[in-house]
Amino acid sequence: IYGGETLFEQFEEDVQVQIKILLVQLKAILLEGFDLVHGRYGSSSSAEKLRRSTSRTSSLAESMSFKHNSPGLPSFASPTPQTTSRKGSTLPLLLIRWSLRDKKRVETIVQNFRDMNTRIHDKVKLWCLASQLGVDLQHLKHLQSDRNSKLLGFDIDATLKLTVCDVESVPSTLELGDESWEEIFSHKTRLNERFSTSAKSGSMLLLEDFPYDVDSVFSTLDMADLVQGNCKIDPRARSRVDALAKLLHQPKELVFRIPRCVGWKYAKAQKLIAFVFDFGNRLHSRPIDLLSLLSDVTIKPSLGDKFRLAHGLANCISQLHILHESFRSENVLFFPAQSSGKGKASSIVDYSQPWVLGFEFSRPEGFFSAGLADFCADRDVYRHPERQGRPEAVFNKLHDIYALGVVLLEIGLWESALTLEKNKFGSVKNPKAVRDQLRKHAESRLASRVGEKYKQVVLRCLTSQLDVVDDTREDLKLQQAFRSHVVDVLKAAAQHV
């Protein structure tokens, strides 16, 4: 499909160079492991032969690294293999050497290889889907069907991207019109104003409610329906709701942390639209949102828990092909496991397993999204200054990243953002003053609780300081910078705490 060329040749020259550098780094890690094993326990000639075969690649990598001001590559120089005779060596001596010295080094090499392999996978997926190439429908359909693409998991993202590009072409509707759903909705258990649970065929269903008053949009309805009292959902709203449901219905990798939507229903009597998500066999687990956890003074997560949660949420934002537009802690849910101790049950929250909801009829990136006026401080505190109150700018990726920064600040301090101002930001009229207050808390309090690197991640999100200039129309540089300065930093913190 690429005119006789490879997929690699479709990337821009700068991306091709980055891929080559990453592969050389990966090869260097492999050579280090080969040298260790063969230098200590095998023939030294084999290692020398492999080193000679990589010398040309090493020189190429060094020149590319210098040209692009990249960090220095791992050296290809390896410890000289042991050349002393092993006639007097015995198996127990080798085992002792392995257990005391070499085993840990090999484990480190394997971990480095695994991390680099994951990094290459994630970057290539980003270049395949988020660059200019990622808007080519023929390319996306190829990723959707190609065997190697399926082995890498790219087909799932390609299918989602195709749906985003042409959501109206998805057949039928996800509106739940069957009468059996009426009973399911009537037997729901309310969790809070937004969420409730029900069950169907042994599976837990999570219902997310959005207020919708037909009377407020009567001008777009058919006059005959109004006269007859047939209050129907506005056609434009129906189209947007159905489009979002279709996007959320598509299969996704677990890293998205977004549950599968099975459909939506308009409840005329309650004046709301409910999205329905299938959570499988979690019938005995009562969901709880992050905001409730932050407000519970008895809950004190470990540093590792905070890092794993922060990384999971940042990774979710980096994977999204749609704009969330309402990312805040009340829209992050957990399903605690139950354990009994000292006569009563207690909940155990797995902070590495958050679920992200609350998409507020989100649109794919690039769609117009000006938004209506909303002066609620509970929601405004998570919004970028350009989006508070009466929005001044079209919603973009930086606004989602800002909201993530607020939630990361909450996680680091383990406090709700609203409590960071004495009047809960109710009397603050200047949107920039809200951001300044959040920055003040980040700069003065975060480092002592979660470290300097975590603090810098939060500040980058709140200030949009991601070192991006002259970005592409697809925000490729922004997405790469976000992964490098935010996602990768939090991942390293979660792995090494």
Image: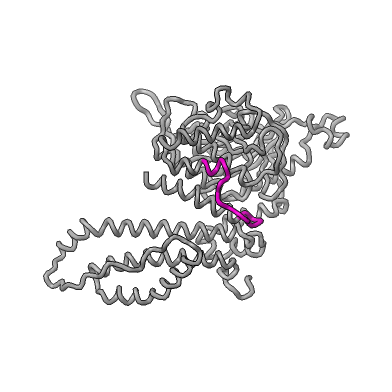
In which quadrant is the N terminus drawn? bottom right
Q: Main secondary structure of the magenta part?
A: loop
- 302 up-or-down from 45: above or below: above
Side of 443 relative to 159 (left or right): left
Residue 461 forms part of the magenta stretch: yes
- 384 up-or-down from 104: above or below: above
Residue drawn at x 53%, y 26% is 419
Whether residue 190 can be seen here: no
Residue 467 point in image, percent of width and height = 55, 51
- 88 up-or-down from 342: above or below: below
Residue 373 point in image, percent of width and height = 72, 33
In which quadrant is the C terminus drawn? top left
Residue drawn at x 45%, y 46% is 490
For residue 161, which quarter of the picture? bottom right
Residue 99 point in image, percent of width and height = 21, 57
Highlighted range, magenta: 459-475
Residue drawn at x 63%, y 64% is 139
The front one of 150 and 58 is 58
Whether residue 399 can be seen here: yes
Residue 317 forms part of the magenta stretch: no
For residue 425, which quarter of the picture? top right
Which color scheme is applied? one colour
The front one of 460 and 185 is 460
- 64 up-or-down from 45: above or below: above
Residue drawn at x 55%, y 49% is 466
Residue 121 point in image, percent of width and height = 49, 59
